[in-house]
Image (cartoon, rainbow, N blue to C red):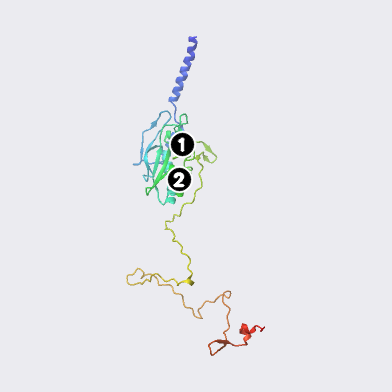
Amino acid sequence: MARRVLPYAAAALVLGLAGCSNYQSAQRPAWRGQAENACLSQNLVHVSAYLQPAREIDGPGICGLTHPFKVTALQNGEVTLNSTALLGCPMIAELDAWLADVVQPLAQARFGQRVVEINSMGAYSCRSMNNQYGAAISEHAFGNAIDIGGFRLADGREISIVRDWTRGDDQTQAFLRDVQAGACTHFTTVLAPGSNVFHYNHIHVDLAMHGNTSTGARRICKPAPQSTLPAPPSDGLPEAPAIDDETDIAQGRAPQPAMALHAGPGSPVASLPPAYTAPAYTSSTRPPQSSAYAPAPQPPARGSMREDGAFVPEGRPEEWDITSSIAPR
């Protein structure tokens, strides 16, 4: 009986080793390395004091990336990160584009200033999705994702997603929702508060490959972007003054100029043109009036003055005195 069992045991051992060998030799999908190489060949990122190459990360398992970068700031140093992030070239390039196309214009429109810092809550990490046991491996494991917890504006104001997503003022809430909506056009995965219980305090963005559709790459954007209130005027002009209540000039004096300017020697108003004066029309230069609006000419009144100074028109009394035309009763 024992001899009959040995072949099965040997076969099981071989299969077990083979399985272990396959696990140890697991490779990252080819598209990931291709995306990194394409990004570098197109010079989409540039080494600087804020962007430094790091050593290749290979494992454990399929975690890692071929050309990682240590990132301390984006947009050539104009937008810092609160902590160093380890990211791949495609993710860095898309973050830069998102900041330039979406975040900065929105911050300028809503707050009149730029974003100067991103509060990063995590970039590269060899782990499963949402750190859940048995879940699929996360895009964080390939330096292809970043979690954003908020922003800092140029005046020092902190915008926190966990606080301001639902409890911020109207402009701040609108800014965060517009930022998320804009992210959905740049990244293939965007998960914000309301997408699930794991993203209540940050926005997760990544460049995972979800397949293609008839209109391009398939994107996951949760929750669905919402319409927001319009941004305030951005012309840079001060607010218009309050309008005073209308004044009934029949009940008051005509307005008087507050100050008379005298253009003395060296006065700044000396070079101003003289005040406009309406031309004096004569009978020969007066423009003709439209007959539609000209008053009907009235004949001159004729009569005589009584001794008491009253004017008595000519004619019979019933023609001009209404009381004389009333028959006596």
Place residue 41 in its image quadrant: top left
Gap in angstroms between the C-alphas marked 2 and 1? 19 Å
Place residue 56 in its image quadrant: top left
Outermost residue to the left: 266
Confirm whether residue 72 shows in the render: no
x and y percent of residue 277 in the render? 44, 74
Q: Is residue 87 above or below residue 303?
A: above
Outermost residue to the bottom: 307
Q: SS at mark 1?
A: helix
Quadrant of the drawing holding the C terminus: bottom right
Mark 1 neighbour class, 10 Å CA radius: few under 14, some 14 to 19, many 20 or more: some
State the residue in front, 233 or 218. 233
x and y percent of residue 143 in the render? 41, 35
Outermost residue to the front: 329
Going by the image, does 216 lie left or right of 123? right
Question: Reading the chain from its start, which is encountered first: label 2 or label 1?
Answer: 2
Q: Which residue is mark 1?
A: 198
Q: SS at mark 2?
A: helix
- Number of callouts in the render? 2
Q: Which residue is mark 2?
A: 167
Residue sitting at x 62%, y 86%: 317
Type of amino acid under label 2: Arg
Place residue 257 in its image quadrant: bottom left
State the residue in front, 196 or 186. 196
x and y percent of residue 320 in the render? 61, 84
Depth check, mark 2 against mark 1: the one in front is 2
Q: Is residue 274 above or below residue 32?
A: below
